[in-house]
């Protein structure tokens, strides 16, 4: 009898383990969408020429989307001759497969926008033209696809759809931006609609949503062109809104949530903002705003009691005290993207510089920097760190740097 019980427990254990592994998510801005990567034993300074370049691939096409990394593969999207493609590499930079995913955005800042989301053996991505696709990780085979404009009555925006799709359980969420389909929940295995939310009937924006899990509710938080909104993840009910400046339309920030508070740094909206979320998720209360903090699409990270971001005017990086909302320190290193790992900040500026910055209770010290040897156009992509490798993307090129200690 004891042997039988032990066998049952082992079967249950391994079943749960397999289930958890199958739900491992690789997505935009890291596991929690907050720009923080749980890497350790990383270099605390770099040589003058930068860390060791492990591999480089220069034919992924135009685009601004970030790579995503799984246990054994690296994925990135790009546009070639107006067609979007998804590329799959092994960890040595060898191309495994390349899959066409439809027409890409060609009107302005041409190229791919959306970073893929990978859950188990399936890949979810959205093109700049609004095609939402589910593909198999093994070979890029299409499982299903839907068009946010044609099928979901969406309305595209000035710079094309750009969100990294959000997956939770059996659901994938997307924002067509239609008057009656502002936000939509789809079955992630079939693409069939579960619910649609009119919300405010506002056009979608360029950020990616986050999911806040409370004891009695899950809340989707995202930006539209004119508001940041909270939506009940189970029903699509609009719970609350936070108005942005009415004359600006480049809302490209992915919100941060920590210890009951929502933070965002939206230079084309209301600047830096701290909101207190009610325990039931149904309402918010503004704690402070600081319109001087003016990042556009570089993201931000929260470490301790400080948010680290960049500013559009003047062009610099800065830290914001989460208690007061005031600037604590600034760093003249142009402006751009930012992520964090192993107690260090990684800054990727719009002029192509990569910096390693030491944060200390709001202070910032530039330790090392180098210029990315890839092109001269806009450097907009947010970097990724996985397995001790720093993945950088600029336009047609993806580069992998080893930032591990020997």
Image (cartoon, grey):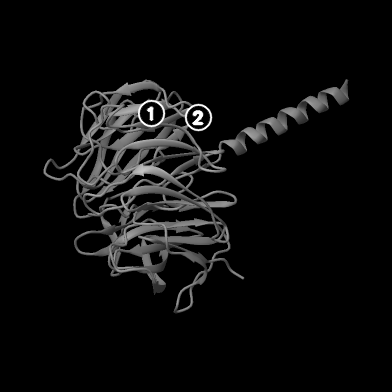
Label 2, label 1: how many angstroms apart (C-alpha)?
23 Å
Badge 1: few (under 14), some or many (20 or more) residues near its Cα, within 10 Å?
few
Point out the frontmost of discs 2 and 1.
2
Badge 2: few (under 14), some or many (20 or more) residues near its Cα, within 10 Å?
few
Name the quarter where the C terminus is drawn.
Answer: bottom right
Q: Eyeballing the image, is 251 above or below 313?
A: above
Q: Residue at x 57, y 66 (%)?
A: 404
Q: Eyeballing the image, is 226 above or below 105?
A: above
Identify the residue position indicated by label 1 in the image.
Answer: 279
Q: Eyeballing the image, is 310 above or below 257?
A: below
Q: Which one is nearer the viewer's eye here, 374 or 370?
A: 374
Dot 2 lies on which element? Answer: loop
Q: Can residue 281 be seen by looking at this rendering?
A: no
Identify the residue position indicated by label 2 in the image.
Answer: 169
Q: Which one is nearer the viewer's eye here, 160 or 325?
A: 160
Q: Residue at x 28, y 24 (%)?
A: 238
Name the quarter where the N terminus is drawn.
Answer: top right
Dot 1 lies on which element? Answer: loop
| Residue 367 in the image, given as x and y percentages of width and height | 42, 73
Hey, which residue is sitting farthest bottom in the picture?
48
| Residue 379 in the image, given as x and y percentages of width and height | 32, 62
| Residue 246 in the image, given as x and y percentages of width and height | 12, 40
């Amino acid at each position: 009898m004891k042997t039988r019980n032990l066998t049952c427990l082992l079967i249950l254990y391994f079943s749960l383990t397999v289930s958890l592994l199958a739900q491992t998510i690789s997505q935009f801005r890291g596991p929690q969408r907050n720009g923080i990567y749980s890497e350790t034993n990383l270099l605390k300074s770099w040589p003058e020429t930068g860390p060791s370049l492990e591999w480089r691939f220069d034919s992924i096409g135009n685009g601004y989307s970030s790579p995503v990394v799984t246990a054994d593969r690296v994925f990135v999207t790009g546009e070639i001759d107006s067609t979007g493609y998804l590329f799959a590499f092994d960890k040595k930079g060898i191309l495994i497969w390349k899959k066409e995913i439809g027409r890409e955005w060609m009107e302005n800042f041409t190229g791919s926008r959306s970073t893929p989301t990978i859950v188990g053996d399936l890949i979810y991505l959205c093109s700049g033209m609004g095609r939402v696709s589910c593909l198999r990780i093994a070979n890029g085979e299409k499982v299903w696809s839907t068009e946010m404009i044609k099928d979901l009555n969406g309305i595209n925006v000035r710079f094309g759809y750009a969100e990294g799709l959000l997956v939770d359980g059996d659901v994938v969420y997307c924002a067509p931006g239609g008057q009656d389909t502002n936000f939509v929940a789809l079955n992630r295995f079939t693409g069939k609609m579960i619910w649609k939310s009119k919300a405010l009937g506002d056009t979608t924006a360029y950020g990616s949503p986050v999911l806040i899990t409370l004891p009695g509710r899950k809340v989707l938080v995202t930006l539209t062109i004119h508001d940041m909104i909270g939506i009940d993840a189970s029903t699509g009910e609009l719970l609350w809104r936070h108005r942005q400046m009415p004359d600006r339309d480049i809302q490209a920030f992915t919100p941060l949530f920590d210890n009951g508070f929502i933070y965002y740094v939206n230079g084309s909206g209301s600047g830096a903002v701290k909101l207190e979320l009610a325990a039931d998720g149904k309402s918010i209360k503004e704690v402070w705003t600081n319109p001087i903090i003016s990042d556009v699409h570089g993201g931000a990270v929260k470490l301790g009691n400080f948010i680290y971001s960049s500013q559009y005017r003047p062009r610099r990086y800065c830290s914001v005290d989460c208690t007061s909302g005031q600037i604590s320190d600034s760093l003249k290193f142009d402006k751009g993207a930012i992520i964090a790992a192993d107690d260090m900040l990684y800054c990727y500026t719009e002029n192509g510089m990569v910096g390693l910055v030491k944060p200390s209770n709001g202070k910032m010290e530039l330790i090392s920097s180098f210029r990315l040897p890839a092109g001269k156009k806009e450097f907009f992509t947010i970097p990724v760190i996985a397995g001790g490798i720093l993945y950088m993307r600029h336009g047609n090129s993806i580069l992998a740097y080893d930032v591990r200690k020997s």
